[in-house]
Amino acid sequence: MTLPVLTADIVPFALSRGTPTKVDLPIEPAFAIGQRIRTKTIQPLGHTRLVRYARGREGVIAADLGVFTLPDTMAHGDIPSPQHVYSVSFTAQELWGPNADPLNTLRLGLWEEYLEPIEGAAS
């Protein structure tokens, strides 16, 4: 499957119309719902959708949202890199420390490339 190239001349059209990034490819997910993960600690030079406050944090896979192109690689040379995106649940205390409300959680949509399994963690 060939994905379209986003060139400067079509950006205004793409932004006004929207361009789907979900792809229909038979890619096996690396993670299962309920699995504990840790986000990678990355410091990219350019674009990433992995927000800084969630880097190096532990969470749980809440849902598999399907296969999408990775915006990080699309922004740096139109390299599609299709992969699963997961809804990952984090406790507020994991993200913002012990003074955060222990009853609050936050879910982030994160690409598979940002995640790593926590070895020995029970699902």
Image (cartoon, helix red, strand yellow):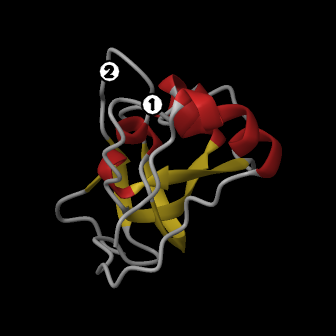
Q: Amino acid at mark 1?
A: Thr
Report the side of 71 relative to 113 (left or right): right
Picture residue at 63% right of the left edge, 60% below the top: 20
Seen from the viewer's position, the closer of residues 64 and 35 is: 64
In which quadrant is the N terminus drawn? bottom left
Seen from the viewer's position, the closer of residues 91 and 71 is: 71
Are discs 2 and 1 less than 8 Å apart at CB? yes
Picture residue at 29% right of the left edge, 81% below the top: 28
In which quadrant is the C terminus drawn? bottom left
Q: Secondary structure at mark 1?
A: loop
Q: Is residue 112 above or below residue 2?
A: above
Q: Which residue does the numbered mark 2 point to in the structure image?
A: 44
Picture residue at 47% right of the left edge, 35% below the top: 50
Q: Position of residue 113 (x, y in %)?
A: 31, 50
Q: Which mark is residue 103?
A: none
What's the CA distance linking mark 2 and mark 1? 7 Å
Q: Secondary structure at mark 2?
A: loop
Seen from the viewer's position, the closer of residues 118 and 71 is: 71
Report the side of 29 relative to 105 (left or right): left
Q: Amino acid at mark 2?
A: Pro
Q: Is residue 123 above or below residue 76?
A: below
The image quadrant of residue 29 is bottom left
The image quadrant of residue 87 is bottom right
Q: Position of residue 64 (x, y in %)?
A: 51, 74
Q: Position of residue 100 (x, y in %)?
A: 70, 31
Q: Which residue does the numbered mark 1 point to in the structure image?
A: 48
